[in-house]
Amino acid sequence: MAVPDESARDAVTLRPVPRWVAPVFAVLGAATVPWTAYLAMSLPARYSAEHYRVAWVGFDLMLVALLLTTALLAWRGSRQVGLLAAATATVLVVDAWFDVTTSRPADVPSAVASAVLLELPLAVVCGWIALHVDQVVERRLRILARRAARAPGRASRTDRRGD
């Protein structure tokens, strides 16, 4: 059997996203840099928000929903757990960032401790889950296939062919 040449392999390469995604996101990322610089220069150092409590409680409720949904999908063995784990990781990092940066000076040590000991390590675990779901599934399928091949009472190839 002939081995496909380099061009044939490139022709069948499956891309996880359309080709336009990379340049569009690169442009969006580059366009965000001047906007961020503008905000750094123009936003006030202090600001009082009308609905500060609602914002934080709502954010934490969203985090609870993500954690519980990630747990449910993991419990059910759904491949969709990777998507929820990625979202949960993101929200955990954002939570840690804003907890630390919006804390009163007296509360900064506990916010940093919470970020370093709880939120960021959990975000790393969620990130690992998101990045490795397919590998874990493949590994488990190979293990199941090996177990099925060794299962007692399984007909051998010669038995099935009638040789």
Image: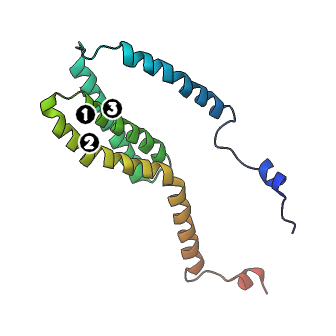
Q: Can you give x and y, in whole percent of width and height, for residue 37 in the image? A: 44, 20
Tell me which residue sits at (34%, 14%) in the image.
43
Q: Can you give x and y, in whole percent of width and height, for residue 52 in the image? A: 23, 19
Residue 100's tag is 1
From the viewer's perspective, tell me whether residue 66 is left or right of residue 143. left
Q: Which amino acid does label 2 sit on?
A: Ala
- Which residue corresponds to mark 3? 62
Q: How crowded is mark 1: few (under 14 residues within 10 Å), some or many (20 or more)?
A: many
Labels 1 and 2 touching (C-beta < 8 A)? yes
From the viewer's perspective, tell me whether residue 9 is left or right of residue 84. right
- Which residue corresponds to mark 2? 115
Q: Residues within 10 Å of mark 3 (few under 14, many from 20)?
A: some
Tell me which residue sits at (26%, 46%) in the image.
116
| Residue 27, above or below 50 | below
Give me the C-alpha separation between circle 3 and circle 2: 18 Å
| Residue 113, above or below 56 | below
